[in-house]
Image (tube, rainbow, N blue to C red):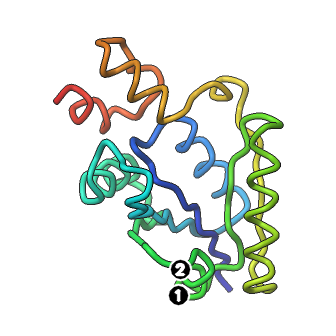
Amino acid sequence: MSHTAIYPGTFDPITLGHVDVVRRGLKLFDRVVIGVAANPNKQPMFDLETRLSMVRQTFVADDRIETVSFDGLLVELARQHKAKAILRGLRAASDFEYEFQMATMNRKLDERIETVFVMAREDYTFVSSRFIREISSMGGDVSALVPDAVLPYLSK
């Protein structure tokens, strides 16, 4: 029996912190489905198709990873992919309260789907997509913080 986790996010853009969460998730699950949220309320820098492309290019060599878009309830996406868990990364204690509330709400919506938290590696606790966008837009070098697949998009 295959065990699948959903890893949701905006991925605007995907960072090496995100990659680390996926890789560590694959130690716990047979398959990870990365759900790229349409989420127009966040006004992302990159459109949905570009974010999907960056994520897919990042994991092109691993058939245990699938990348899909979604715009509805996360638990619905989990049901569609027969996922047993939602995978989330925590960078700092400040992330925990928000993530705890989301996990509690998702459990209320479908108690069969667990939320699994993995702690960020120390190398990535300060990395966020927002910082990447900001640093890159001012000409800063973010090559040590994002997958190679992201760099051409940031230079545009």
Q: Amino acid at mark 1?
A: Gln
Secondary structure found at label 1:
helix
Dots 2, 1 in contact, CB < 8 A: yes
Quarter of the image with the N terminus in it:
bottom right
Pick the residue in front: 47 or 123: 47
Badge number at residue 80: 1
Q: Quadrant of residue 63?
A: bottom left
Q: Quadrant of residue 91?
A: top right
Badge number at residue 77: 2
Q: Residue at x 52, y 56 (%)?
A: 9
Q: Does residue 26 sit above or below 66 in this rendering?
A: above
Q: Residue at x 71, y 72 (%)?
A: 85
Q: Does residue 119 sit above or below 70 in this rendering?
A: above
Pinpoint residue 44: horizontal percent, then vertical percent. Answer: 36, 47
Secondary structure found at label 2:
helix
Pinpoint residue 30: horizontal percent, then vertical percent. Answer: 63, 69
From the viewer's perspective, tell me whether residue 121 is left or right of residue 48: right
